[in-house]
Amino acid sequence: MVILTTLALEFAGAAVLTWRFYSHYGFSLRDAAMRGGFHSVSAFCNAGFSLFPDSLMGFGADWWITLTHAALIFLGGIGFLVLYNLFQIKFWRRDIASRGRLRLHSRLALLASLLLIVLMFFPLLINEWNRSLEGMPAAEKINRAFFQAVTPRTAGFNTMPVEKMRPSSLWLTMLMMFVGASPCGTGGGIKTVTFVILIASVFSRVAHRDRVVIFRRTVPEKTVLEAMGISVLALGLVFCGAVFLFYSESPDISVHSPGGFFGEILFETVSAFGTVGLSTGITPRLSLAGKLIIGAVIFMGRVGPLAVALTIGKTGGAPQATVRYPEDVAVVG
């Protein structure tokens, strides 16, 4: 299912992009097919690599190009478990029992992905309307802002100059990059479902509930602990990576973006952790040590959350200790 779904979606995306590059931008059929295929694979796999020097900045007014990329990014990011669940549902049947249903994981992944896009789109459009989007037609501003709301959680394409964004937009982008894609998807980050469970657990504690309940389903305590463990370790990785970069890099590498040196380094680190690839422009200016640090953060950001989840959720292993120590009080908060 994974192989066939990947090939089908990438082929469909490549066909649309090839047609657009060939018919509208004057590329030869061979060149258009090569670019369409490359960008389709890059978008679905949430890689963010582009054959154009300015990523997709030159196509910010082209709805065919941006929406095709956005659809591939979204479908690759929600994860194969969700796609498999959707393929099993017979939407044309009226009987709920024979139709099938969305599992809790699928509902959380889809809802969180859509909500995060909305929460990114409107503030970004308002913040950048007269800043990085100044002088563009209204429809183009909406198109660029929408695509930029889709891409930061998972892929590194951009239709807006990141280095010119307001600090508030950069910080919101960092949050989206930190959350990332959905479990079993092609993106990085702590994952959308992890983020939702983390928020739900906080509300449960505030409401003095002993269980985390979402959509009338109880989330197992093991899953809640996995979400907490992944989030804490992810924050620790970002913090350590940023601190090492502050030591290895000089403020001279700053490209004088609104975020300043501190914001640029932090943005670079979070982008590396989420395997997004967006940058304010300092990546080529990093020292050898800085590039090695970024490479390490990318690797640990992609492999780390999965390894932590597998380790925490592993059953069996060593037997439980026979000694139980007495409980005592420790005040938190």
Image (cartoon, rainbow, N blue to C red):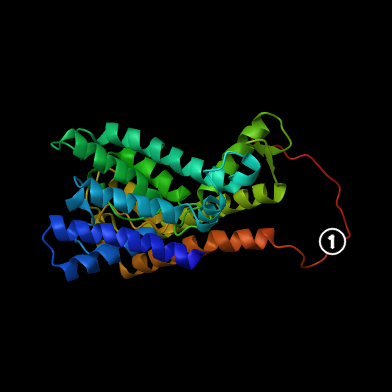
Q: Quarter of the image containing the C terminus?
A: top right
Instruction: Left or right? Give the position of 30 relative to 39.
Output: left
Q: Secondary structure at mark 1?
A: loop
Residue 149 vs 246, above or below: the answer is above
Identified at 67% across, 59% down, the residue is 312
Q: Is residue 57 visible?
A: yes
In percent of width and height, residue 54 lies at 20, 57
Badge 1, how many Cα within 10 Å: few under 14, some, many 20+?
few
Give the quadrant of residue 242: bottom left
Q: Residue furthest top?
A: 207
Instruction: Left or right? Give the position of 243 relative to 277.
Output: right
Q: Is residue 195 visible?
A: no
The residue wearing badge 1 is 321
Instruction: Left or right? Give the position of 192 relative to 319.
Output: left
Q: Residue furthest left?
A: 26
So how many labels did they put on this image? 1
Amino acid residing under circle 1? Ala
Instruction: Left or right? Give the position of 284 relative to 135.
Output: right
Q: Nearer the viewer, residue 308 or 139?
A: 139
Residue 9 vs 123, above or below: the answer is below
Identified at 41% across, 59% down, the residue is 275
Identified at 30% across, 45% down, the residue is 147
In percent of width and height, residue 189 lies at 47, 54
Identified at 28% across, 54% down, the residue is 251
Q: Nearer the viewer, residue 142 or 18?
A: 18
Residue 165 vs 26, above or below: the answer is above
Q: Nearer the viewer, residue 287 or 127?
A: 127
